[in-house]
Image: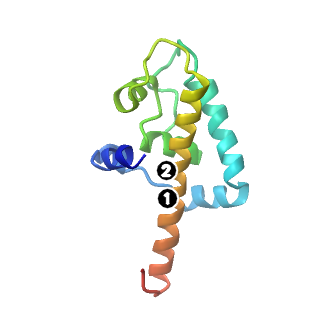
Amino acid sequence: MDDLFARLQKSRFRSSFKLGAKDLKYIEDKGLEVIRTHAYDFITKRLAPATILNDGKQTPMRGHPVFIAQHGTATCCRGCLYKWHHIPTHRALTSQEIDYIVDVIMHFIELNIQESKLLKEDNDGNIKS
């Protein structure tokens, strides 16, 4: 995943997506396992079918940490899945592909949580190691 995230960081658009304070609080309140369940639900309903009526517009830009993560990881539509992850369009996603997409999303979320903790430590006057 390191290679993927290195490529995503080179994209001005993809690297602009970060979880905000509300998103981080929501994750803290719900827990990562609930967020993972939400990710599976969103991917299964919005990306997994072979034909998606509003492909390219099915993932909101805000409103849930998973949506932010999808845009930040190019897992927001089938076109981005093809371009960034080489997952073919016009066919249903396999269970392995869904697992991969959710793992990518959760990796993004976990990185954002770690980054926010480091920033909080810096803002509290502690020296970052």
**Residue 76 circle label:** none
Res. 25 image quadrant: bottom right
Q: Is residue 48 left or right of residue 61?
A: right
Q: Dot 1, how many residues are within 10 Å of its Cα: few (below 14), some (14-19), or many (20+)?
A: some
> Which residue is at the front of the view, 22 or 35?
35
51 vs 33: above or below: above
Q: Is residue 92 left or right of residue 30?
A: left
The residues tagged by marks 2 and 1 sit, at their Cα atoms, a distance apart of 6 Å
Spot occupied by residue 28 in the image (x, y as percentages of width and height): 67, 61
Q: Could one spot residue 76 in this view of the protein?
A: yes
Disc 2, disc 1: CB below 8 Å? yes
Q: Which residue shows up at 36% across the image and 32% down it?
A: 84
Type of the residue with mark 2: Phe
Q: Dot 2, how many residues are within 10 Å of its Cα: few (below 14), some (14-19), or many (20+)?
A: many
Of helix, strand and loop, which one carries label 2? helix
Residue tagged 2: 108
Spot occupied by residue 39 in the image (x, y as percentages of width and height): 62, 39
Q: Is residue 73 left or right of residue 83?
A: right
Q: Which residue shows up at 44% across the image and 16% down it?
A: 89
Q: Could one spot residue 20 in this view of the protein?
A: no
- Quarter containing the C terminus: bottom left
Q: Is residue 32 left or right of residue 129?
A: right
Residue tagged 1: 112
Spot occupied by residue 15 in the image (x, y as percentages of width and height): 35, 50
Spot occupied by residue 80 in the image (x, y as percentages of width and height): 39, 29
Type of the residue with mark 1: Asn
Of helix, strand and loop, which one carries label 1? helix
Q: Which residue shows up at 38% across the image and 26% down it?
A: 86
> Which residue is at the front of the view, 92 or 71?
92
